[in-house]
Image: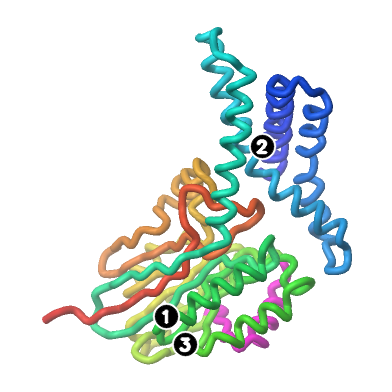
Amino acid sequence: MFFLFIILYVFAGYISAKCIYIATKQMWLGVATVLLSTTFPIARRLMHFWTPSNWFLNIWCYIGYISIGFFMYFSMYCLCVLAVWLFWKKLNLQKAFLFGIAGVVILLCYGYFNAMNPRLKVIEIPSDIEAKICFVSDIHVGSIGTVKLLNRVTNLINSTDADFVIFGGDTLDLNALLKYKDEFLQSMERIRKPKLAVIGNHEIYAGSSENIELMRQAGIHVLLDEAQNVGDLTIVGRIDSTYNQRKALKEIIPADGHNIVVVDHTPIAVSESAKNHAILHLSGHTHDGQMFPMNYVPRFKYNIETGVLRKLRNMYCYVTFGAGFWGAPYRIGNHPEVVLIHLKPRVK
């Protein structure tokens, strides 16, 4: 899958380079665009050697991930323009491509600002009990802009009157231990609420044991196919499905479990939660594709809509957009979020 993505990415770079040359009549800009299209594949390899002291690798990786959005949107725009030109030869290609360059840059500036500024979303769910849960997933500590994003997420959590916080996986990523360990610990120390977490696929990719230890140092109780009673709730935290030896849900739920809330990073086992009489299922992972029109990919893959509270049997399910991003530092078509879930007693 990644190899196919790289082929499409390089093709997008070639299309973009040709159209930039048509727009500017400058050969060097076309060549520079082709070279720029190689930064992301190379950055993917350099990420494995990214260290705090190597400023060159940091800059290269930053450029590589920033460029993803440009090549994605500009190449799609160019293909649309060329399709129109085939039927309407009067179209001025040079002006159309110049307009596209400006439009894509403006769109990406918005997407970057949006990605760096998650919002607080409040959801009310009718229940037999009163409880407030702050749910945060997919921060991806270690990505571009980690410090700013961590501060924003921490401030949003502290602005709520939640009883406790649940981190829904992919809290930490590849460079969390190398670059942002101190910043992460400081941010978590500022959160004066009980903290629980599950691990996602990126904690597993980056080294689950080391990342679990870092979260524990930060005062977070990590649920590894475990259940924890919190007030009137039983929180069941599942190891991500990337780990193929995780337990079945019925093996995790205690016999005396009550008002069960299942937290499972990837939303592939929602129906299993409903069958086991959970009142709430929480997931993340999808980012809703992060950038339109990629939102249709996770919706098709998981057959679930992100950011929408839905009911299955007697259980409510919510899949969050996530608070951060992975790879390209953009959010286009959705808003990153910290979610306050208010379980509100039914009116009798």
Instruction: Estimate the x, y position of residue 250 in percent, counting from the top left.
Output: 43, 76
Q: Regarding mark 3 in the picture, which secondary structure is present there?
A: strand
Q: Which residue is mark 3?
A: 228
What are the residue bounds of the magenta stretch? 206-225
- Is any atom of residue 245 visible in this view? no
- Of labels 2 and 3, the one closer to you: 2
Quarter-of-image position of residue 160: bottom left
Q: Which residue is mark 1?
A: 160
Instruction: Estimate the x, y position of residue 4 in percent, counting from the top left.
Output: 68, 38
Lower sequence index among marks 2 and 1: 2
Lower sequence index among marks 2 and 3: 2
| Label drawn at residue 273 | none
Q: Quadrant of the C terminus?
A: bottom left
Lower sequence index among marks 1 and 3: 1
What secondary structure is the magenta-colored segment mainly? helix
At label 1, counting other C-alpha atoms closer than 10 Å, the crowd grade (few under 14, some 14-19, many 20 or more) is: some
Q: Amino acid under label 1?
A: Thr
Instruction: Estimate the x, y position of residue 93 in percent, counting from the top left.
Output: 61, 17
Q: Which residue is mark 2?
A: 71
Q: Is residue 207 magenta?
A: yes
Q: Regarding mark 2 in the picture, which secondary structure is present there?
A: helix
